[in-house]
Amino acid sequence: MTLAQRSNESGNTNTPANDNQDVEAAAVVDEESIADLVRRTERRAMLVIFGMGGWLLLIPAIYAVLTHGI
């Protein structure tokens, strides 16, 4: 198995492969962004559920209009 060479796209060739960033600080940022993503997904799911429920409530009214010609 051969290893592929990766190009340094940032243009900074003096930066080592492991730039020794604080792992705990990065984990906190990642946890916060993941929590934000989950909250947005939950809100969207609730809107979809309520929207589907609203359309289901309209079905009897549509049926009454179509059958009785009101």
Image (spheres, rainbow, N blue to C red):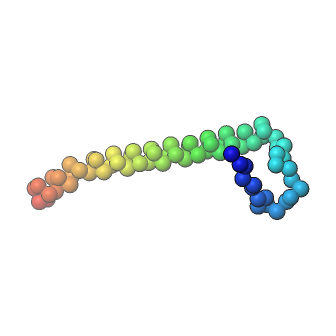
**Nearer-the-camera pick, 16 or 69:** 16
Relative to 62, 46 lies left or right: right
Q: Quarter of the image containing the N terminus? A: top right
Relative to 12, 3 lies left or right: left
**Nearer-the-camera pick, 70 or 46:** 46
Quadrant for residue 24, please give it: top right
Where is residue 48 drawn, in percent x and y? 41, 48
Where is residue 55 drawn, in percent x and y? 30, 51
Image point (28%, 47%), residue name: 56
Relative to 4, 57 lies left or right: left
Quadrant for residue 29, please give it: top right
Where is residue 50 drawn, in percent x and y? 39, 46
Q: Work out which residue is located at the far right of the displayed protein and give it.
A: 14
Image point (75%, 42%), residue name: 26
Q: Quarter of the image containing the C terminus? A: bottom left
Where is residue 6 drawn, in percent x and y? 75, 55
Q: Relative to 34, does residue 4 appear above or below in the rendering?
A: below
Image point (82%, 49%), residue name: 17
**Nearer-the-camera pick, 69 or 2:** 2
